[in-house]
Image: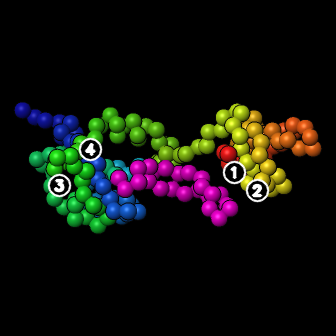
């Protein structure tokens, strides 16, 4: 009986050492393993400035595609950057192909990673963190352009719609 090679393979979760997901991925690939390391790009505020960072979608975890009984699991735990395979009762834990496919399908195809977009909801209270309105609190009204938003601010005793860059507001 002939088995389809792909159908026998399963994904397994790999627990990595802190901040060593990329190192683990690189070293596992060098050993010939098929590895999936989902990443996310997000804007974060550091020292008063917004910057885009790319990091792990699941900190300290990545996935390796193996065939039990055929692939050698032993070298994985001694790979630089790896702590061990995730195990329950001493048995490596599989992750369903459907879950891995669902994670991959949600990636931005052009960038090959997940993109974290801030989801502003009309009526949400926000604070302006930069520019002439720094420190003022207002209400998010709507997005007005690609990187701009409209905020309702209480100025001079009345409500005023102000358009600002979305990177200059944070939720309260």
- The CA distance from mark 2 to mark 1 is 9 Å
Q: Which mark sits nearer the N-terminus, 3 or 1?
A: 3
Q: Residue at x 22, y 39 (%)?
A: 6
Q: CA separation, marks 3 and 4?
A: 12 Å
Give the SS element for disc 1: helix
* Left or right: 68 as drawn, with respect to 159: left
Q: In the image, is 42 to the left or to the right of 97?
A: right
**Classed neighbour count for the residue bearing mark 4: other residues with Cα under 10 Å, few (<14), some (14–19), many (≥20):** many
Dot 2: what SS? loop
Q: Which residue bears the numbered disc 1?
A: 167
Residue plotted at (68% across, 48% down): 170
Residue 34 visible, this angle: no
Residue contact between numbered discs 2 and 1, judged by CB atoms under 8 Å: yes
> Would you say residue 48 sits in the magenta stretch?
yes
Classify mark 3: helix, strand or loop. Answer: loop
Tell me which label, 2 or 1, sits earlier in the chain.
Answer: 2
- In percent of width and height, residue 25 lies at 34, 58
- Is 171 situated left or right of 134 in this image? left
Mark 1: few/some/many CA within 10 Å (<14, 14-19, 20+): some
First along the sequence among labels 3 and 4: 4
Q: Provide residue 75's location: percent of width, then percent of height.
A: 19, 61
Q: Quadrant of the C terminus?
A: top right
Name the mark on residue 130: 2
Query: Which residue is the site of mark 3?
Result: 73
Would you say the residues marked 2 and 4 are in contact, meaning their CB atoms lie under 8 Å apart?
A: no
Residue 17 image offset from top left, x and y in percent: 33, 62
- Closer to the eye: label 3 or 2: 2
Q: Is residue 167 magenta?
A: no
Which residue is tagged 4?
11
Residue range of the region highlighted in magenta in the rendering:
39-61
């Amino acid at each position: 009986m002939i088995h389809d090679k792909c159908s026998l393979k399963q994904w397994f979760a790999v627990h990595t050492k802190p901040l060593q997901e990329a190192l683990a991925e690189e070293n596992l690939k060098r050993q010939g393993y098929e590895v999936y390391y989902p990443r996310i790009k997000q804007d974060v505020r550091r020292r008063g400035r917004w910057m885009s960072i790319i990091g792990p979608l699941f900190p300290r975890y990545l996935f390796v595609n193996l065939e039990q009984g055929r692939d050698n699991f032993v070298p994985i735990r001694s790979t630089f950057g790896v702590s061990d395979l995730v195990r329950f009762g001493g048995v490596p834990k599989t992750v369903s192909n459907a879950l891995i496919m669902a994670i991959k399908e949600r990636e931005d195809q052009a960038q090959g990673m997940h993109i974290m977009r801030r989801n502003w909801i009309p009526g949400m209270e926000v604070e302006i963190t930069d520019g002439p309105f720094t420190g003022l609190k207002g209400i998010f009204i709507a997005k007005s352009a690609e990187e701009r938003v409209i905020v309702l601010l209480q100025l001079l005793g009345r409500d005023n719609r102000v358009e600002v860059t979305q990177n200059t507001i944070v939720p309260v």
